[in-house]
């Protein structure tokens, strides 16, 4: 039973354009959401997070949107750069149950120069 | 400052052997987590240590898996009688105390069970 799903396994985008990554979750207890980026042979690197009391959080080129009623979040990267090519993981936690994260399966992003 | 380190970076073992994987968290981080990533999949939570509280072992897949942590420092994940399905990248993360604290990951240990 996958509680966090990333339905697009891959995404290809032109440099300078917007990348939109989507994530759906089923557990209504989740109240904290994160995006991590992972390069091959490295551990995931934290990108951005959002609490369930917000619907948007922005940090430079990265913006995360949360739609609680739809149990959906998205990550927007604009403008996309070749160095953004990596696998992106959506993760969620129910803070009352501790800080353990439940991850989606990842989306591989390729930014073409 | 130093990040999370893990050793070994790669481990190849034969089915049935025991393995130990080590994690050194960021200094001052009271919480430590183990996850694993099988090929082509997302990360799976295994176990979580928070200060002196009893660890959350709810993600351990079988009783062949165990982990220990000495105080607020090094942790060791032990897999006994390894099976081929244990092949994965085992990732350790650490964070400050408290819900919502950002977890910082090590580079992982790639375990291959032949």
Image (spheres, rainbow, N blue to C red):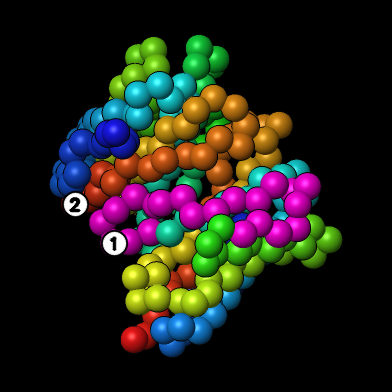
- Residue B111 location (% of width, % of height): 24, 47
Q: Look at mark 2 in the image and give the residue it sits on.
A: B114
Image height check: is B24 above or below B103? above
- Residue B63 location (% of width, % of height): 43, 30
- Residue B64 location (% of width, % of height): 37, 31
The quadrant of the picture occupied by the N terminus of chain A is: bottom right
Disc 2 element? loop
Q: Using the image, tell me which numbered label, if any, was put on residue A40.
A: 1
Q: CA distance from mark 1 to mark 2?
A: 22 Å
Confirm whether residue B105 shows in the render: yes
User: Magenta stretch containing residue A85, yes or no?
Assistant: no
Residue B36 lies left or right of residue A42; in this view the side is right
Residue A86: quadrant of the picture: bottom left
Q: Residue furthest right?
A: A69
Disc 1 element? loop
Residue A70: quadrant of the picture: bottom right
Confirm whether residue B23 shows in the render: no
Q: Are marks 1 and 2 on the same chain?
A: no
Q: Residues within 10 Å of mark 2 (few under 14, many from 20)?
A: few
Q: The magenta stretch spans which residues? A: A38-58
Instruction: State the residue at coordinates (54%, 80%).
Output: A18
The quadrant of the picture occupied by the C terminus of chain A is: bottom left
Task: Report the front residue among B73 and A61.
Answer: A61
Instruction: State the residue at coordinates (78%, 47%).
Output: A53
């Amino acid at each position: 039973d996958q509680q966090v799903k990333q339905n697009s396994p891959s995404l290809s985008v032109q440099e300078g354009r917007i990348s939109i990554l989507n994530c759906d979750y089923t557990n209504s207890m989740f109240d904290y959401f994160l995006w991590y980026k992972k390069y091959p042979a490295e551990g995931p690197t934290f990108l951005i997070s959002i609490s369930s009391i917000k619907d948007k959080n922005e940090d430079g080129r990265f913006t995360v949107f949360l739609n609680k009623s739809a149990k959906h979040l998205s990550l927007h990267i604009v403008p996309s750069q070749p160095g953004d090519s990596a696998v992106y993981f959506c993760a969620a936690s129910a803070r009352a149950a501790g800080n353990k994260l439940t991850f989606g399966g990842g989306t591989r992003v390729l930014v073409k120069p | 400052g130093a990040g999370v380190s893990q050793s070994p970076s790669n481990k190849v073992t034969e089915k049935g052997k025991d393995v130990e994987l080590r994690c050194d968290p960021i200094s001052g981080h009271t919480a430590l987590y183990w996850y694993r990533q099988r090929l082509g999949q997302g990360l799976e939570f295994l176990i979580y240590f928070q200060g002196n509280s009893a660890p959350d072992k709810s993600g351990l897949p079988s009783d062949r898996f165990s982990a220990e942590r000495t105080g607020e420092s090094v942790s060791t994940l032990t897999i006994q009688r390894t099976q081929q399905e244990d092949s994965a990248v085992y990732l350790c993360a650490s964070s400050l105390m408290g819900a919502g604290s950002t977890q910082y990951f090590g580079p992982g240990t790639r375990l291959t069970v032949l």
